Image: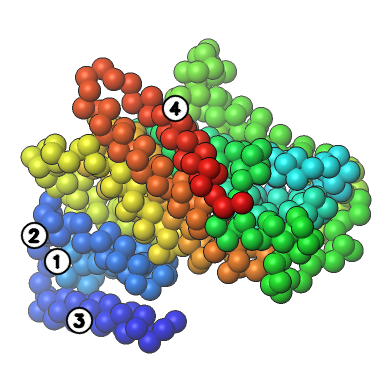
Amino acid sequence: MTKRTRRWMLAAVALIVIMAAVSMIALAEGEEAPASPFYKTFWSLLPPIIAIALALITKEVYTSLFVGIIVGGLLYANFNLEVTLTHAFNNGIVASLSDSYNVGILVFLVILGVIVMMMNKAGGSAAFGRWASSKIKSRTGAQLATVALGSLIFIDDYFNCLTVGSVMRPVTDKSRISRAKLAYLIDATAAPICIIAPISSWAAAVSSCVKDVNGLEVFIKAIPFNFYAILTLIMMIFLAITKLDYGPMAKHEKNAKEKGDLFSGMKALAEEANENANPKGKVIDLVLPIVLLIICCVIGMIYSGGFFEGKDFISSFSDSDASVGLMLGSAVTLIITFIYYLCRRVISFKDLTGCIPEGFKSMVPAILILTFAWSLKAMTDSLGAAAYVEGLVQTSAEGFQIFLPAIIFLIACGLSFATGTSWGTFTILIPITLSVFPLTAPLGVVCVSACMAGAVCGDHCSPISDTTIMASAGAQCDHVAHVSTQLPYALTVAGVSAVTYLLAGVFNLIPGFPLILALPIGIILMICTLLIIRLFKKP
């Protein structure tokens, strides 16, 4: 932590201490905390503003969210320390963790972490890599196979990075694909794929940010408007088929193809020893749990939506409870996978049970972010922030509606890039966005999708992002090389996405014009942009 960061943190702590001292004086005099004068005023937005500002300055999302929670409690209690602590912890953190919907999401995340750990220990990833290396012969085929595998493993971005890297390294090395290119493909099929997959830890997180309506239904409706994620997938396929590379990536690919130098002279990270992989693992040990998880979660969702009580599939899926469905589906998958590995004798009972605490620990960062984000939302709700913003927008926002989706996308990009976390970004911004444009408004879903797309874009570009770091580790690539070679690609997609969101705002002004047409236009713009780059690229 730098000296400047420490000074900011000390200033924030000092401010809280001063506020606490003022409230202690009030308590010493036996006074009760009066009704908050900050309710439904601009000050109700101060907690998320402070959380965002601190996150940008300190690059620490956990501390920033917690400080935002405390500030919200102080404003609600009019700086009465006793009421502040009670409100922040009881009505904030404890209430969020005791909410049945939120608990179901957390249980799903823990079970998912355990399943991921079991699959890695079973050696299914290594087995798939050995099989793929014997089937794939060309550079294009190796890249498309990497994209396909990354798209298949959409349940969690952490699992994606760790699995795709270990599986595809032998395949891409044999095809003389640079480690920088492999790291890009891993990173671009992690968060961008998870954010458009209805059955994933990301869908659960986004659904939990949308209250009073079916969060999963909102997530599904937002998928066609998640331009960054969809255009990133289009770009990867285009680059593989046309063999186009530009920016620093072109040098890495040229060195790999012509000289066999996969690292362009940079120091290679230590390779994993082959003996660490479970020799008993087979391809089915990777495929079966993933397929089971998808099937069981779908069944769990339609079960929670009343499918077995007579409803049709579509209605039951749209009326489903994502928390219950994902929790039940993952639990059944865990039990079946546990029994399957025991019957296969691919991993011992002791190692299987050891995966439980290890899987839990792997999900602690995600659980912390969600808990603090839920609590921060509870603080802003208690201050009437939604009502204040809604009234403000109704009188002054009509003039800039055309720019709002693009603006939200760019704000989310900047926040996610600076903090290195997409979850912390969209859990902060989505509630604020819904206060500006509710889901009943035409641009409501588009703006929610812009939050998610921007959060993923910033996370994709950020050198301090977990997924960026894990993509480097998964590809065994120098981290600086990965960030520098990936950035031009990510910025290209971000630019086209921003233009597409601007077009969506324009289309909203045309009565009866379907906003969904922004997607095919965005795809055409993406392809045209890449063709222009290819045309002017130096041979």
Of marks 2 and 3, which one's residue comes earlier in the chain? 3
Instruction: Indicate which disc, 1 or 4, sits on the residue closer to the N terminus.
Output: 1
In front: label 1 or label 4 = 4
Residue 105, horizontal then vertical, whole percent: 51, 45
The three-letter amino acid code for the residue at tag 1 is Asn
User: Residue 520: which numbered mark, if any?
Assistant: 4
Give the image location of residue 203, x and y in percent: 50, 41
The kind of residue tagged 4 is Pro
Residue mark closest to the camera, 3 vs 4:
4
User: Badge 1 is on which residue?
Assistant: 78
Residue beneath label 2, please?
Answer: 37
Looking at the rendered structure, the kind of residue marked 3 is: Ile
Left or right: 83 as drawn, with respect to 4: left
Q: Which coloring applies here?
A: rainbow
Assess disc 2: are there few (<14), some (14-19) or many (≥20) residues with their C-alpha within 10 Å of its C-alpha: some
Earlier residue among tags 2 and 1? 2
**Residue closest to the far front:** 539
Q: Position of residue 388 (x, y in %)?
A: 14, 47
In terms of sequence position, does the residue under pointer 4 or pointer 2 come before the other?
Answer: 2
How far apart are the two marked residues, 3 and 4, measured between alpha carbons?
Answer: 55 Å
How far is the residue under mark 2 from the one under mark 1? 7 Å
Q: Give the mark, 3 or 4, whose residue is nearer the N terminus.
A: 3
Residue 361 or 182: which is nearer the viewer? Answer: 182
Pointers 3 and 4 in contact (C-beta within 8 Å):
no
| Residue 269 numbered mark, or none | none
Q: Are marks 2 and 3 in contact (CB under 8 Å)?
A: no
Observer able to see residue 421? yes
Residue at 44%, 55% in the rendered image: 458
Helix or strand or loop: what does disc 3 sit on? helix
